Amino acid sequence: MSAKVRLYLVATLLALGLGIALTKAGTLQLLRGSKLKHLAERQYIRPKLYGNYRGDILDRKGRLLASSVSVDSVYAEPKRINNATQVVKSLGKAIRLNRVQIEKLSSDRSFIWLKRRIDPNTANKVRNMDLEGIGLAEERQRFYPNHGLLGQTLGFVSIDGQSLGGIEQAFERYLKPKSWKTLALQDARGNPIRQHVSPPEEALAGNDIMLTIDRNIQSVTEEILQKTVKKHGAKAGWAIVMKPKTGEILALANVPLMNPNRPSKHDQKARRNNAISLTREPGSTFKIMTFAAAYDLGLVKPDEKIYCEKGRWNLGYMTIKDVSKKEWLTPAEIFKYSSNVGTYKIAERIGPKRLYETIKKFGFGELPGLHLLEEAPGFVSNYKSWHKTRFANMSFGYGLMASPLQVVMMVNTIANDGLKVSPAILKGIHKHGADTLANPLPSSAPIQVISKEAAQAVKNMMLVEYGHKGSARRAAIPGMLIAGKTGTAEKLDDTGRYNKKLNISSFVGFAPANNPQIVALVSIDEPQGIAFGGYVAAPAWREIVEAALLE
Amino acid sequence: MLSRMILVSSAILILMGIVVVYSSSGVMAHFGYHDSMFFLKRQILFLFLGGMAFISAWILDPRLYQKYAYYIYGVAIFLLLVVLIPGVGKAAGGASRWIALGPFRLQPGELFKVALVVYLAMSLAKKGHKMQLFRVGIIPHLVLPGIAMGLLILEPDFGTTVIVALVTFTMLFIGGARVAYLLGGILISIPVAVHLIASSPYRMARMAAFLDPWSHRQESGYQVVQSLMTLGSGGWFGKGLGHGPSKLYFLPAAHTDFILAVIGEELGFLGVALVITCFAALLYVGFTVALKTKDKFKSYLAAGLTSMLIIQATLNFFVVMGLVPTKGLTLPLVNYGGSSLIVGCWMMGVLFRLSRELGR
């Protein structure tokens, strides 16, 4: 082998090596490039979440019901702490640390919370210590400036931002802050190097939502309820105040109040929104349905007389009893004296099928449509399964389950001359700080469920004139004609029997009767002593409606 | 023409090196030395010294190296001994490869490599046809480099040891040693290399990382995986100078041994191809000079220096691309490091001188 050949051979081999390197570079950069790039970027770029401002909840006039305030929380990065003993000693002057936390401070963890949501004073103390590895993080805390006002309806937000119940949870998709992924470049040690500009907080804040609630009416309603519950030694009370034409809820009160700022202080029962979730047998208020069906079908005449069996009618399979022992009564008198006998006699003319159809048309057994998770649909069994007793009971409000909201909606349809609207609690949604409204919730078109004439006939029966006698007289407002119905429903006790001592006393009605502006329901749960709705609930109803009419 | 190719190729490599050294070391220098231009400034200073080395190599008659080859080799060996003296040799990462000279560090391994080429070129030229004989062609040329390799292993500097071995074999082959003897030598060295790897836990870890870097990506394979991701991120045109995030402590030795990955990341495949092309040009020039030079010593010197340059560059590429296990190997002319750059410039100066002599 000549020297030249040897040189050529070596040069060729070396060139081959460079060729291999070039090929490999091409493979890595051009063929596997995007895969490797993706893998690399996963470590450089971490999505960072900005925007922690949950939208406000406002009343119909823009007054705050729920807001978010910033608070500081103390955290530690134990990895960066050199002298844990010194840090514990210093920190101890401001916040109390437990044994576990002190142990963790000496570990090599990268992050631990020391104390969430501290007051501004403590925050300043910690800030001034300027300890290496100890930091303050700004967090948002949900704040309800009116304390217990509308508490059960608003729901609350947990310490980790989880919405629990009520408006907070039902409208989470609007309220929650927008997540914002930014390319936060970080080095291998996790230090941020460069952050892309984040949009202003307003752009990332959740949407504000405006409720149909009027804070003043809500407040008055709650006060009156509290007063009434106290006066009668009752367990609880609830009330709904509504605008008849739009179905907008002005007040949705549950007493005792629940303060969503401190949800842990209230048990599960106190957090319940009874006004929309508690289903009970509605009792004599429900007679409105029987009369509505009868008038709509033209089965009764206002001036006819119906024999009421002196308040006791033995049908063989059951005995229907009345409180007032009357003989011949007009439909209006049957309604006024709340005669079960008379009501059933009218129901017999209607028959189960047509009564059932009317009940369903009024929305019983279905969700009213507030879009709140607590809403209850109640229960109405199909008429085909009704035996005679069930049918009789049904005609005067037993044997079915309905929520207070459903009862209000029934009366609302009467107030609207038979036009059924959907109830509403959400008035609008708008960008945080802006004032343009847009309601994205589907609202079903109003439906005429009974004829106008039938509705007016029922309305006429419900009229309560000031100064007149009758069970509803305490609801009467001076100088104004109102329409309403008392209700005194017996509750089932623990043994499963109707207990005359356990009642829900209620009054539901609207005012003024000829041009309804306000529909309202007031229920008092288990009042002591006299439990008649006209005695317990009617005065509270009058006070609430008077206040609402003024607003 | 040849001399111009040397100037252009080495200038491209050196300038690209300086720019990328700045890009890849800036952040680290800013936090480590409170001066983002710490490494840049030093590299520019080294380039100045390198320029002087280039000019002296251009002026000096290469026959001087031939004349003083033993002395040069002796000094280089001496420095390899000095670096082993505790206190004198600067340890970094478990190895003592540097001698502190004020604020600078001399890496005797870099000097030794060129001393070896000079010695071998001189010796091969002297022995001529007797190279065929085992006693003359092989034995002496294994003894002297063998001593050096032993010292390098003691540092330990496995990368330079491998380069020394490869350069020695290459030059013996060029010098006319029998292929059978060389193959025998390779066969003997394999168990030695295996023993060296197996006896050192970190070399074993590197071997495991080499075989399957992605499974060891959090430990021993970290550097390789980072290097592959960094290089791969560049695509055709790269992310642009200064825009690669790998230098944010992700890729260790970003401005030294792994600078090619950063070049690939910021300048793309085109940047890498340019680097490889420049080395290919130097390979062409070096061997053309070796072929055309009548003087045996000069021919061997040109071939030896070029071989060493290309072998080291290629091995560096292979390390960065995960084709061979990781070892401490610089990319001549390009990456940060005074000894490496100055010696590289001297080599370019010698090749430049030899290419100019052809024309006469």
Image: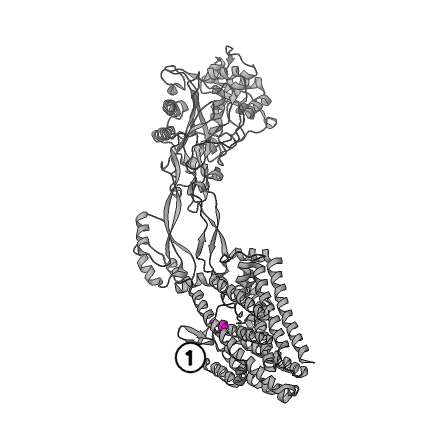
- Horizontal side of residue A25 vs A416, given as left or right: right
- Quadrant for the C terminus of chain A in the image: top left
Q: Quadrant of residue B6?
A: bottom right
Q: Amino acid at mark 1?
A: Val
- The part of the chain drawn in magenta is B338-342
Q: In which quadrant is the N terminus of chain A drawn?
A: bottom right
| Nearer the observer, B163 or B184 | B163
Residue B340 within the magenta-colored segment of the rendering? yes
Q: Is residue A170 above or below residue B30?
A: above
**Rendered residue at 66%/72% (across/down):** A12
Does the image show residue A525?
no
Magenta run includes residue A365: no
Between residue A227 and residue A155, name the one nearer to us. Answer: A155
Query: Residue at label 1?
Result: B88
Identify the image quadrant of residue B48.
Answer: bottom left
Farthest-out residue, right = A1
Q: Give the SS element for disc 1.
A: loop
* A382 w.r.t. B278: above or below: above
Q: Is residue A510 above or below residue B161?
A: above
Q: In front: B25, or A442?
A: B25
Dot 1: few (<14), some (14–19), or many (≥20) neighbours within 10 Å? some
Judging from the image, mark 1 belongs to the subunit labelled B
| Secondary structure mostly seen in the magenta stretch | helix
Image coordinates of residue A487 in percent, x first then y, are 44, 24
Q: Residue furthest bottom?
A: B135
The location of residue B123, given as percent across then percent down, is: 58, 85
Task: Give the percent coordinates (x, y) of residue A290.
Answer: 53, 20
The spot of residue B215 in percent (x, y) is: 57, 64
Report whether residue A351 is seen. Answer: yes
Q: Nearer the viewer, residue B286 or B321?
A: B286
Instruction: Classify residue A515 by image quadrant.
Output: top left
